Amino acid sequence: MRTVLFTSAALAVVCFNAPVAFAQDAPVALDEVVITAQRRSENLQKTPLTVSAVTGDKLESQGVKTVVDLASQVPALQITSSGSGAAQVFLRGIGSTNTTEVGDPAVAYHIDGIYQARSTSVGALFYDIDRVEVLRGPQGTLYGRNATAGAINVITKKPVLGEYEGAGSIEVGNYSAVTTSGLINVPIGDTLAVRASFQQSRHDGYVNAINQGPGTGGNDRYDQDDKSARVRVLWKPSDNFSLILNADYLHQGGAGGGDGTYGTTRVTGDPWSCYCSTNLYRNNRFFSTGAEANWDLGFANLTYLVGYNFSKLDRTGENASTGAPNYFLGKDYTWSHELRLGGDAGKLKWVVGLYRFTEDNNVDFRVFLANNSYLSFIQPEITAESIAVFGQTTYEVTDRFRVTGGLRYTEDKKGRVGGTYLTNSAGAIVSTVVANVADAKWDATNWKLGADFDLTSTSMLYANVATGYKAGGYYDGIADNVYAPEKITSYEAGVKNRFLDNRLQVNATAFLYDYRDFQVSALGTIGGQDATVTLNADKAKIYGLEFETNLALTEHDRIDATLGWLHAEYTDFVLPRGDSFSNNNANASVAACYTANYAAAAPRSTDFSGCRMARTPEWTFNLGYQHIWEPSFGGTLTGRIQTHYETSKNLEYHGFAQNKEGAFTKTDVSLTYASPDDRWTLQGFVRNLEDDDVRTASAPNSTTGLATNGAGEFYAPPRTYGLRLGVTF
């Protein structure tokens, strides 16, 4: 901890000796950003947390349309979209690849304060957004379970009283891409306003399906056909009370994605084509509604948040080995309630609250085998419940020094009734492979201690020690099929600075994680047979440094950059019975990071201690430059170039060569003209200028157990380009 504090303080000293003459008589300054990461509105630079905030204007200008596109904006953030549309989010090396109905994320995702439990619900389009906040590090006190690695908060724009506002845009590009969006804000009297917005986005598939003969052709993959709409209503009858009602709808159509298979007959050698056999489809629907009530009681503010989310997933997939179709149908219902009371009593700022979350899910997933029979996972009742009580307070010891303490107690309960069956072509159950029944409970107490100190009026040093918790779970079977929660303790110190009359911002963070009982797939027993199960491994250690900076060089020039260095490895990770790869003798000569005694009979103990964690490049770097011209005919012309670089990384923890991604860069350029009255803009853009084939996920095939044979892989989009016209009225 002393080293962390010394590093941060040393950076501050260096910054203090910057040539302040550079800023004299400067007519420009960086914008102030207000966030609500600590459940109250405060300046980003005055918040003693490691937070990245991306404004809605920046999201729009840089083509960030979903959470997946956010990865190039934030240090240590890795996001992958699977073929089903589910998002896998990793932050500082911690995440989850289990996107099924029983898997929980390690990064808590919220839209307007409402927790999104399923990874498929994270795919909602970004439009009419005020900002996105990414909190790095465990957020166990204020955000609770499944915020082990951090939290992502998406805040949409609120209705505005007393103002008419409207906007629309159309974007066209290669792959026959068309995106349209619009919004309107209508005041109704002095106390009521309605804001409605929509976005439609479609493009042809990035992966071309090659027909190998009659009856073998599938459709193109990784297309998009999404339609979404949102309505928000604000009622503010007095200065001390307001109520916001929300409703959101999203439909995902098209083919969606599909595993890029490895087999000898199914791969073309080109990631943008496949010998696909199945015509895929998606007919996924998402609906959410909720309300936020705020009441100023004088001594404190009372907030009540309620949210309801419904999703219906109806899609097909393609078996990675055989090319046969898979069918998935699932419905998910969640309710969340949060009641908070927070106040500011001079030197003391505090917040206390109660939280409750419930989920009901049902799933029917069928894999075609042969002779019109299916292996069917039918789980008609999957439930989860979480309740919590929490509080956090900050006390101003002096006008420059503050201390913070927080505490949260959480109880979780999960259950399932269902099974794995053999079914016939009519859908009837022929026989039971294994019953899937679970009923488990856990509880956790998380805490936080922090301190921050104003070095100057525009520079702050802070340090936090905090814990986080990811709920436990279960795997198939009926007994001894429960695994424990993950736990993390974080030590973090940072410095936030504004220099040169608010023209230069330099933020830096150092952190150390003690990560325990992380959840991994291993070899176990289900119904007396060897099978893949989820177990808890012992320990991992993660530490790193992150830097973020923005500089207003002149009235017309801006530079922004982020730099991240990350060390992440398993320090105590032994699978007592190994897994399908370490127990396959064919892998004895294959390079890997684990140690297994192949002279011993399988199943054999396997040691992953010392292996680097998945999706953790050692270095990541983002750099952007923007220049504004003022042509003689009026208006402004803004050019921007930005690039993202990261070093090589393992995409899963075995260390197999085929599942590694090398170092790469991704560069985006844009040129935007804005009319003299700012009523319309025209932008031309190119994204992924290099057009490199960058894998974002890759896994070996646990069915075959061969290190040289995989289940599938996913790629970031190829080069795209287009034009965007936007108007306001």
Image (cartoon, rainbow, N blue to C red):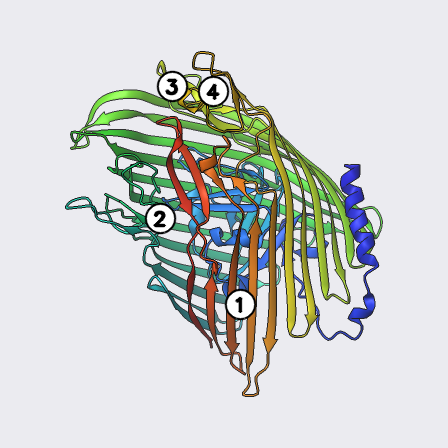
Q: Nearer the viewer, mark 1 or mark 4?
A: 4
Q: Which mark is residue 270?
A: 2
The residue to which callout 4 is attached is 578
The alpha-carbon separation of the residues under discs 1 and 2 comes to: 50 Å
Is 108 or 624 nearer to us in this picture? 624
Q: Nearer the viewer, mark 4 or mark 3?
A: 4
Q: Amino acid at mark 4?
A: Gly
Relative to 95, is 598 above or below? above
Q: CA distance from mark 3 to mark 1?
A: 54 Å
Disc 2 element: loop
Lower position in the chain sequence, tag 3 or tag 2: 2
Q: Residue at x 56, y 47 (%)?
A: 77
Foreground: 374 or 245? 374
- Upstream in the sequence, badge 2 or badge 4? 2
Q: Is residue 638 visible?
A: yes
- At label 1, which amino acid type do we have? Val
Q: Horizontal placement of 90 versus 297: left or right?
A: left
Instruction: State the CA–CA distance, disc 2 to disc 4.
Output: 33 Å
Mark 1 = which residue?
160
CB within 8 Å, label 1 to label 4? no
Q: Are marks 1 and 2 in contact (CB under 8 Å)?
A: no
Q: Nearer the viewer, mark 3 or mark 2?
A: 2
What amino acid is at disc 2?
A: Asp
- Density class for disc 3 (Cα within 10 Å; few <14, some 14-19, many ≥20) is many
